[in-house]
Image: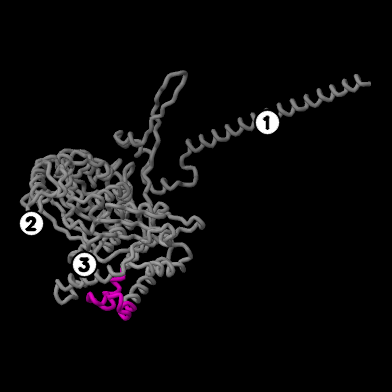
Amino acid sequence: MALAGIKLDRQKIIIVAGAAVTVSVSVAVAAGVGWWLGGRFVKKKYRDRRLNPQAKQQPSHSEHMSSFSSQEWNSLPAEGERRDSVRIDFQSSGDVRQRKVSIPQVPVQHPVTSGPVSSYDDNADVQENIVLVMVGLPGRGKTAVANRTARYLAFFHGAEVEVFNVGDKRRRAKGYMKGEEYDFRNRKNMDQRMKYSYDTLQDMKDFLKQKNGRIGIFDANNVTRDRRKWILQELQDLDGRAQVIFVELVNKRAMIYQAEMAEDDVKSASKPRDSVEDYKKRVAHYMDFYEPLASGGRLDDPEQQYAYIKCIENGTQIILNKIKGYMPGRITQFITNCCHVHWMTQKKLYFSRHGQSEYNAAGRIGGDSDLTEMGERYALALKEFAEERICVDSETRKAIPARLWTSTLKRTVRTARHISTSVIQRDNGEPWIQMKARHWSNLDEIYAGACDGLTYAEIKERYAKEAAARKKNKLAYRYPRGESYLDVIQRLEPIIQEIERHRESLLIVGHQGILRMIYAFYKGIDREQAPHQTLELNHVIELNPHAYRTNEKIYNLLPYEEAGDDGQKQH
């Protein structure tokens, strides 16, 4: 009976195994048939699209923005091929081969951003606001840093930012205040000044409540712990959607000169010197009650829980506390670079286009052409200007440190090549190489892509739709296979950071498209209007930025020569 049972079990096993094999084969056959049919369908769909390009399909963003046909793309110059192909390395049977794979690229118009790069609350999917609260004694450069930071955020990050200055509110409401009116012991004066602070803070809160992602800068002295605590309490009704960062500028001495003072204060004083003397009295009153940020020296100091940036002695020491996120990081880098701007009274910026190039004379854009004879004459005149004005103090005639930057293109390098370099002694005794040229690819002219080397008349004739699109929105328009001014702004951001970091005067020999953007930033011109600025050949622009304004001078180095129309004045 036992043996019979064993035979029965073996039969069952054989039957089950046979069924399993049958099922497996059936599944494999079904999968193979499905793969074959799917491949046939995909091939047919691809073939139909290839043979019938007019077939209805959802257009991409690139197709919406381009006016180029496939024939026009195929006829574009081979020079652009290096930007539209990729070299792929692959290994087969032990050897390495290369092949070039063409990747067609359609010009895409860069969108104009209306707000900053996102900075999100960890606990909510809502873009939060940022509040910068300035802290420090009068005469330390708070307003200069606040205004410069606001321009940086608006111009390079598209942020909706506004500075709310308590002093401006006071000037509009009352006008000039004498030094004794800032005495903290006078309760009546303190109540009046507190009202100006409260009204200004309410204005900033209204600005932030209108839309998420905005940045408000509260520009006041805020020198006491109680005042800073009050500000945080007032901001609580923003529902936690505001990241508050205190920015403190610490210096042992004050820098007081009229160029950095509010024009209304200087005009309202009975004598210009009165405004300076009253300013000194104001500083003295604030010093009696000044409590630096987190100055308790204890780890349990409540202000250690604040996010803050502390710049000590013009940035020679930087203390950061609880700075988190992309935009706060960009703000921090810029402020730590520019925190000394109030003290750099001799620092000036000089912008010069290269001397006339062969392409300028022919009315063509882009390229890497050499200088004409007029361009060479301008290069010699620029050498004389740089050595006699930029590198020498205008009053003492003493040599002062200065820098020289150019793009990597031939016409700027050759324009600056005559400017001599020499070794001078800085005030601290260290040697300095005067006007040592630095060549930046970031300063190269805006790349016109398929239109490089053409005149504007030729562009209009060959690519009428592209010419119309550029005219409609010059800031956002991107040349086919080229750049837009928004692209230029992006690659100029590190340049601005470096300009702010350096403390010496700077001469930039560049191109009109690039200098337009740098010039507009320092002049406070909206970036939508920046591409329409005109910088003429044979001229040097001198800028001297201050807290409330940027002074400008223009020098014509070849007054008896006319460069003519280089094709860019109206474009």
Q: Give the image quarter of residue 328.
A: bottom left
- 169 magenta-colored: yes
Residue 250, percent across and down?
A: 28, 60
Q: Quick one: label 3 or label 1, which is nearer the N terminus? A: 1
- Residue lying at 81% horizontally and 24% vertically, measured from the top left: 13
Q: Is residue 464 visible?
A: no
Q: Give the image quarter of residue 116.
A: bottom left
Cα distance, mark 2 to mark 3?
23 Å
Q: Are the two marked residues, 2 and 3, in contact with CB atoms closer than 8 angstroms?
A: no
Residue 26, percent across and down?
A: 71, 28
Cα distance, mark 2 to mark 1?
92 Å
Q: Is residue 262 visible?
A: yes
Indicate the amino acid at tag 3: Met
> Along the line of sight, which residue is nearer the eye, 544 or 232?
232
Q: Are the two marked residues, 2 and 1, in contact with CB atoms closer than 8 angstroms?
A: no
> Along the line of sight, which residue is nearer the eye, 83 or 557?
557
Residue 234, percent across and down?
A: 43, 70
As drawn, is 330 to the left or to the right of 554? right
Toward the left, the furthest residue is 560
As drawn, is 546 to the left or to the right of 396? right
The dot on residue 261 is 3
Does residue 452 sit above or below 517 in this rendering? above
Q: What residue does disc 1 label?
A: 30
Q: Which residues are magenta?
A: 165-192
Circle nearer the viewer, 3 or 1: 3
Q: Quick one: label 2 or label 3, which is nearer the N terminus? A: 3
Residue 177, percent across and down?
A: 24, 76
Q: What residue does disc 2 label?
A: 395
